[in-house]
Image (cartoon, grey):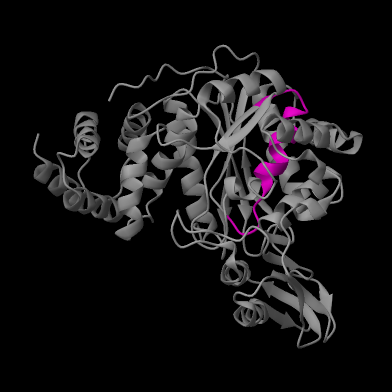
Amino acid sequence: MDIIQIIDKKRQGLPHSPEEIRYLVQGAMAGTIPDYQLSAWLMAVCLKGLDLEETTALTQCYVESGQVLDFSEVQGIIVDKHSTGGVGDKTTLILAPLLASCGVNVAKLSGRGLGYTGGTVDKLEAIPQFNVSLPTEQFLCQVNSIGVALCSQTGELAPADGLFYALRDVTATVASIPLIAASVVSKKIAAGAQVITLDIKVGEGAFMKTLDEAKSLALACREVGKRLGRSISTVISRMDQPLGNAIGHTVEVIESIETLKGRGPKDLQDLCLVLGAVALVDAGTVPNLEAGKADLMESITSGRALEKFRALIQAQGGDSQVLDDYSRFPHPQHYIEVKSPASGYIEHCHALKIAQAAKVLGAGRLSKSAPIDLSVGVVVSAKQGDAVQKGQTLATLWANEMGVEEAKKLIQEAYTYSERPPIILPLVEDIFLATEPVTKPSIKACI
């Protein structure tokens, strides 16, 4: 095969055969196809697209480029949840112990953040001594023993996706629904779960800006998963303002603990109940979403969910006393209130401005190796629809010496006001439950 002909074929909008896609991925992994030609192909895909057959072939090649975790020795169904990202999205910290306390196994490999705020792994590191790097054998053993494990993802899973994503990130070729679907689904399949729930964000603070885009991505992920033997359900949730009130690391872990204690923000709890119920229905442990929500809520009110989080922290070497004593977390030097300059109703609480404020305080990173400050962040006190008076606190900065004035300015810019209560869109826009029976696929590493 000829890589130039493959690039030209996609430039013309013609479909690739599975053999052509395999040739492309294998050449990328072997280093025989240079980055500039891979980048040209990625741009052609952004402009001309991939059909479902091409997207499935690309996803399978990504999976087969590395290790696929084998949970055949683990008793019970393995559940995984993935979010396309968002400001204040700490649902994994809540859902992992919550679902495990309801009798399903949660095996979650998460990443670090890049950009405005940290990823799940960064947040977990706010728990003193928590070990985010588990060998595969220990990871599997922990899932089998306590039903839940959370650790950092390994480069051995879908390494071809990592290679292509690195190029997409620097060539303005991230914005492609087929490429996003192949990336997301390949990592979830390689991570070994039988039941996969995808939380696809839509809105001003999300990558998918419109509901049509989000629904297209959800459909692509479901169909690719179905063709590769995985049960994938999708939930589309709004990300126009932060999820919950906390944005940062320590602040988000504390808010997660409060939610497991039944004292968390309503929007965060509601979304966790929806995502968790979808997973329980797919796993076959409850007959419908309402029954799933009831089981999850009972686990919170009874304290079982919090105790499962305690078991998770202890299993991974962390200080579980943080659940009862928040002073054991990293804390900043200053707590600075930002006041409202006007009275009225909050029309918008722009997610990206809030995220930028957390970033300038030190909560975000520009490169994966850059240090972050686990103690800083933003806790918002007013969100869309709230009535505020002039001088009322909008948000509190958890700050050290870095970026305070700029963060204050960004918080002020994040809020707009109206004389009447604004129309508030539903948090959850769409739920699609998988109907296929849970099966274990036969994909093996072969590249």
Q: Is residue 78 left or right of residue 418?
A: left
Q: State the quadrant of the N terminus.
A: top left
- Tell me if I can see residue 197 in this picture: no
Occupied quadrant, residue 360: bottom right
Residue 122 lies, in percent from the top left, at 59, 50
Q: State the quadrant of the C terminus.
A: top left
Q: Is residue 401 left or right of residue 33?
A: right
Tell me if residue 87 is in the magenta stretch.
yes
Residue 13 lies, in percent from the top left, at 21, 49
Q: Is residue 277 left or right of residue 47?
A: right
Q: Residue at x 81, y 55 (%)?
A: 327
Residue 231 lies, in percent from the top left, at 54, 27
Residue 130 lies, in percent from the top left, at 66, 40
Examine the rendered structure and indicate whether residue 48 appears above or below residue 281.
Answer: below
Examine the rendered structure and indicate whether residue 145 appears above or below residue 183.
Answer: above
Please report the bounds of the magenta region as a residue range. 86-105
- Tell me if I can see residue 348 in this picture: yes
Q: Camera-side residue: 156 or 35?
A: 156
Tell me if residue 370 is in the magenta stretch.
no
Q: Camera-side residue: 238 or 253?
A: 253
Q: Residue at x 62, y 64 (%)?
A: 240
